[in-house]
Image (tube, rainbow, N blue to C red):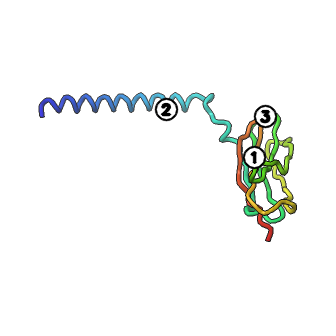
C-alpha cells in the first residue's frame, strides 16, 4: 500500500497538470479572434416546411462578396438559382412547378457552400 500512494499522487499530479494546460489553451483560444468560425455566423432559414406552392428563404451573411442561393433536387440537379446582392434578405421561391419530394437549399459564398438546409415540397 505504501508503494501505491506515491503512484496515485503521481497520476493525480499528471491529470491536474494536463487540465491546467488545457484551460490555458482554451483561454488563448477565446482571446484569439482569428479562430472565429465564419461558417457558423452565416444563417439560412427555410419556411414553411413542407412547402406547397412557395417557401421563404431567409438568410444573413456576414461578408458579402459573390453569393447565391441554390436549390437542388434529391439527385443533385439545380432547379433554382438566385444571385444575392444584400447581406440579409428574404426571398419567396415559387415551387408550384417542382415535383413532390426532398430538395436542398444552399447558401454559396465565393464558390463555397456555407449552409445547406432540407426542404420538402408536397403539393396536396
Residue denoted by label 3? 110
* Disc 3 + disc 1, Cβ < 8 Å: no
The numbered mark, 1 or 2, whose residue comes first in the sequence reads: 2
Query: Residue at image x 39%, y 30%?
Result: 20
- Please state, as top left, top right, bottom left or bottom right, where the C terminus lies in the image: bottom right
Q: Which mark is residue 72?
A: none
- Please state, as top left, top right, bottom left or bottom right, where the N terminus lies in the image: top left
Query: Residue at image x 79%, y 36%?
Result: 64
Q: Give percent across and percent down for residue 41.
A: 68, 41
Q: Which mark is residue 106?
A: 1
* Disc 2 + disc 3, Cβ < 8 Å: no
Q: Give percent across and percent down for residue 79.
A: 84, 51
- Label 2, label 3: how far apart the Cα atoms are: 31 Å
Query: Residue at image x 71%, y 45%?
Result: 115
Residue denoted by label 2? 26
Please tell me whether mark 2 sits on a helix, a strand or a loop.
helix
Q: Residue furthest left?
A: 2
Amino acid at each position: 500500500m505504501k508503494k501505491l500512494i506515491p503512484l496515485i499522487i503521481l497520476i493525480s499530479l499528471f491529470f491536474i497538470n494536463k487540465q491546467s494546460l488545457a484551460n490555458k489553451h482554451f483561454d488563448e483560444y477565446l482571446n484569439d479572434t482569428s479562430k472565429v468560425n465564419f461558417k457558423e455566423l452565416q444563417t439560412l432559414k427555410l419556411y414553411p416546411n413542407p412547402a406547397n406552392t412557395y417557401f421563404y428563404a431567409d438568410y444573413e451573411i456576414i461578408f458579402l462578396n459573390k453569393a447565391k442561393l441554390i436549390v437542388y433536387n434529391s439527385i443533385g440537379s439545380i432547379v433554382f438559382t438566385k444571385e444575392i446582392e444584400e447581406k440579409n434578405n428574404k426571398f419567396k421561391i415559387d415551387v408550384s412547378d417542382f415535383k413532390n419530394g426532398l430538395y436542398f437549399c444552399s447558401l454559396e459564398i465565393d464558390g463555397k457552400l456555407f449552409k445547406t438546409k432540407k426542404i420538402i415540397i408536397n403539393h396536396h
